[in-house]
Image (cartoon, rainbow, N blue to C red):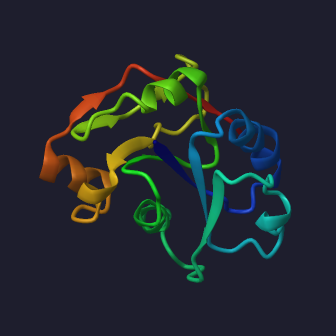
């Protein structure tokens, strides 16, 4: 099984139009939404009533995005965890491939659009939850475990 960890950051439109259908389509995947401050648009009202979605609330408004995602990984139910942000949506190819990852594999998808305009570098990656406890960011994880990096799947960038 797989857990996908993403941050919410008050992006109601993206969550409703892209993440909710993904949650419905992939009932076998746990979706862990890390929420640091949804006072403007309460996340709970947007969540589908599905057993494969949870919220990990973090009360620290000043927390960095990297630390917020790390808290999500540590709260995941599954050993394989894809870490992404709300603007980076896994393609069907990526969703299917996640189940075949081994303990020392690290998926680092590229963008679906090969010639993006004004897109940031894709920062999505997968980790083994148990190993991540000792290296709580992407660079430390790579240095400590030297995983086999797989980059042949893609993500969509949504504004």
**Residue at 43% across, 32% down:** 99
Q: Is residue 112 above or below residue 120?
A: above
Task: Give coordinates of residue 158: x percent, y percent.
Answer: 69, 36
Query: Depth check: 118 or 18 in front?
Result: 18
Residue drawn at point x = 35 percent, y = 25 percent: 151
Q: Nearer the viewer, residue 33 or 68?
A: 33
- Residue drawn 21% across the image and 46% down it: 142
Instruction: Kindly give the residue lying farthest to the bottom in the view shown.
Output: 59
Q: Quadrant of residue 51?
A: bottom right
Q: Quadrant of residue 17?
A: top right
Residue 65 appears left or right of 132: right
| Residue 39 drawn above or below residue 95 | below
How far across and down, in percent of the image, does residue 71 sit? 45, 68
Q: Residue at x 40, y 65 (%)?
A: 74
Say left or right for 95 vs 17. left
Residue 76, percent across and down? 47, 59
Q: Nearer the viewer, residue 139 or 150?
A: 150
Residue 88 image position (x, y, % from top left): 59, 39
């Amino acid at each position: 099984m797989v857990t996908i960890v993403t941050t919410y950051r008050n992006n109601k439109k993206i969550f409703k139009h892209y993440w909710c259908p993904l949650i419905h389509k992939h009932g076998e995947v746990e979706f862990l939404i890390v929420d640091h401050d949804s006072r403007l648009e309460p996340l709970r009202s947007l969540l589908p009533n599905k057993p494969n979605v949870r919220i990990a609330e973090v009360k620290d408004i000043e927390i960095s995005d990297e630390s917020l995602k790390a808290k999500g990984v540590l709260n995941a139910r599954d050993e394989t965890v894809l870490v992404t942000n709300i603007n980076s949506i896994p393609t069907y190819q990526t969703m299917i491939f996640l189940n075949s990852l081994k303990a020392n594999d690290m998926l680092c998808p590229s963008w679906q659009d090969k010639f993006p305009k004004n897109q940031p570098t894709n920062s999505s990656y997968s980790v083994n939850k148990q190993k991540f406890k000792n290296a709580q960011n992407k660079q430390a994880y790579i240095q400590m475990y030297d995983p086999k990096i797989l980059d042949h799947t893609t993500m969509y960038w949504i504004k």
